[in-house]
Image: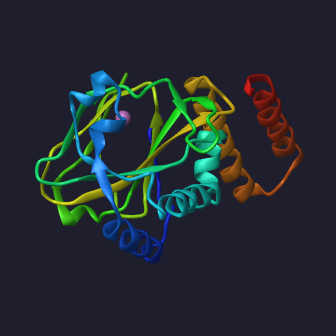
Amino acid sequence: MMLHIPEVLSKQDVITLRDTLDAGAWVDGSATAGPLAAEVKCNEQFSTASAQYLGLSQAIVAALERHPLFLSAALPDRILPPMFNRYADGGTYGNHVDNAIQMDRNTGERLRTDVSVTVFLSEPEGYEGGELIVEDTYGSHEVKLPAGDAIVYPSSSLHRVAPVTSGVRVASFLWVQSLVRDAWQRNMLFELDMTLLKLRAQVGNNAEIVALTGHYHNLLRQWGK
Ligand code: NI
């Protein structure tokens, strides 16, 4: 499932984050890629050693954790510290799959990557190219969202970032270890949750909806960690 999550950050939040990011230190992105990914990765990453990094990273996590759609779709157990990348001057990231296990740089813990998230921090009209292209069983999906919006997709999918031929594309990216490891089960829970929300808005909290809500939670008990 690919899901567009609108307004994770307000436009003002984006401006504040971008002011700090644009004035900060950026390093060659290939340094943090595995050997295979490094061959196709041509971008910059905000230095995780810089004094501003932790605050910026925490602001992204806090915004996601406030967003009900993100919580329902990703069912986060642990969220790896978000990082930031920048593409300009033909910068690109060719087809790759993200590492299944990533180390949390704050705790040293190894986490499984179930859900990938990109939060766009540049307005789409500010750059040419730069689409995130995700391949799944239904084909290839191109994503280019307004600044502050996010896309959530399974970490198991092949994906790439098209070359940025003019302007600058800044984004935050991160991985989630989900309470529900299986993408199909996670998707079923998400659809059930969204349907229940709509039903509740239509008819209120009747006995059947309470029973179905019970089933949602019992499925989460079955499938969750
Ligand atoms: Ni990737």
> In this picture, is 133 found above or below 184?
below
Quadrant containing the C terminus is top right
Residue 4 in view: yes
Residue 71: % across, % down? 64, 48
> Which residue sits furthest right?
207
- Residue 133: image quadrant is top left
Q: Nearer the viewer, residue 90 or 48?
A: 48
The residue sitting at 45% across, 37% down in the picture is 153
- The residue most toward the bottom is 12
Q: Position of residue 104 (x, y in %)?
A: 57, 38
Q: Position of residue 128 (x, y in %)?
A: 14, 56
Q: Residue at x 29, y 65 (%)?
A: 123
**Residue lying at 61% horizontally and 60% vertically, measured from the top left:** 62
| Left or right, residue 90 beside residue 155 | left
Query: Splitting the image into 4 quarters, where does residue 158 fall?
Result: top left
Q: Which residue appears at 49% of the width and 66% of the height?
A: 9
Decide which of 210, 21 is in the foreground and name it: 21
Q: Quadrant of ligand 1?
A: top left
Residue 81 place in picture, x, y as percent? 54, 47
Check the image and tell me how it is coloured.
rainbow
Horizontal arrangement in the rendering, residue 205 relative to residue 160 (left or right): right
Give the quarter of the image for residue 205.
Answer: bottom right
Instruction: Tell me, yes or no, if residue 75 can be seen here.
Output: no
